[in-house]
Image: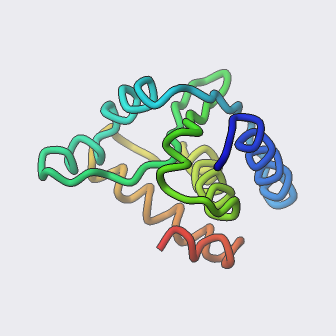
Amino acid sequence: MFNEKDVLKIFNSAYSDFSKKNKIKCSLKLINQKEFNQIAKKCKLVQDNLKLAIVPLVGALTVHSIENDTIYASADILNEITEDKNFVKAIFMHEFYHILFKGKVKKNDSKEELKSENRVNKQIAKDFPKLAKYMD
């Protein structure tokens, strides 16, 4: 079971590993499950899944801004998804690639979000193949 201190430690480890290959600037904001769900509902892919009555599996989300990108996570949700710290590390790596590739996203719609997911999945598989297996 992860507490907020554990999640922060995993985030910092992932950020350190990622930073050896790529440079990004971001911060982590740990929030409760209710706040996380409100942010998740703004994501076009999450909206599409909910319309189809599919509960999406989302462990973290990135909100982009000019000054600083923020990754939002909830220890409660991460605990619902996994007990494996490497899985949580993979989730953060995935979000780091969204930040790295944010300039490639052309529109705020489901099609572009899906392209972004595919781009991120390909790159994490290339750079961090052991962690990418958690995202399959």
Please name whichever residue, 28 or 22, is drawn nearer the observer in this view of the structure. Answer: 28
In the image, farthest residue toward the front: 1
Q: Quadrant of residue 72?
A: top right
The image shows residue 99 at horizontal and vertical percentages of 60, 44
- The residue at the point 68 percent across, 57 percent down is 89
Looking at the image, residue 114 sits to the left or right of residue 65; the answer is left
Q: Is residue 7 above or below residue 36?
A: below
The image shows residue 41 at horizontal and vertical percentages of 31, 33
Q: How is the image coloured?
A: rainbow
- The residue at the point 48 percent across, 50 percent down is 80
- The residue at the point 44 percent across, 55 percent down is 116
Q: Is residue 55 above or below residue 35?
A: below
Please name whichever residue, 50 or 2, is drawn nearer the observer in this view of the structure. Answer: 2
The image shows residue 35 at horizontal and vertical percentages of 44, 23
Looking at the image, residue 13 sits to the left or right of residue 3; the answer is right
Number of on-image labels = 0
Looking at the image, residue 89 sits to the left or right of residue 111; the answer is right
Please name whichever residue, 42 or 59, is drawn nearer the observer in this view of the structure. Answer: 59
The image shows residue 103 at horizontal and vertical percentages of 54, 43
Looking at the image, residue 52 sits to the left or right of residue 2; the answer is left
- The residue at the point 67 percent across, 46 percent down is 2
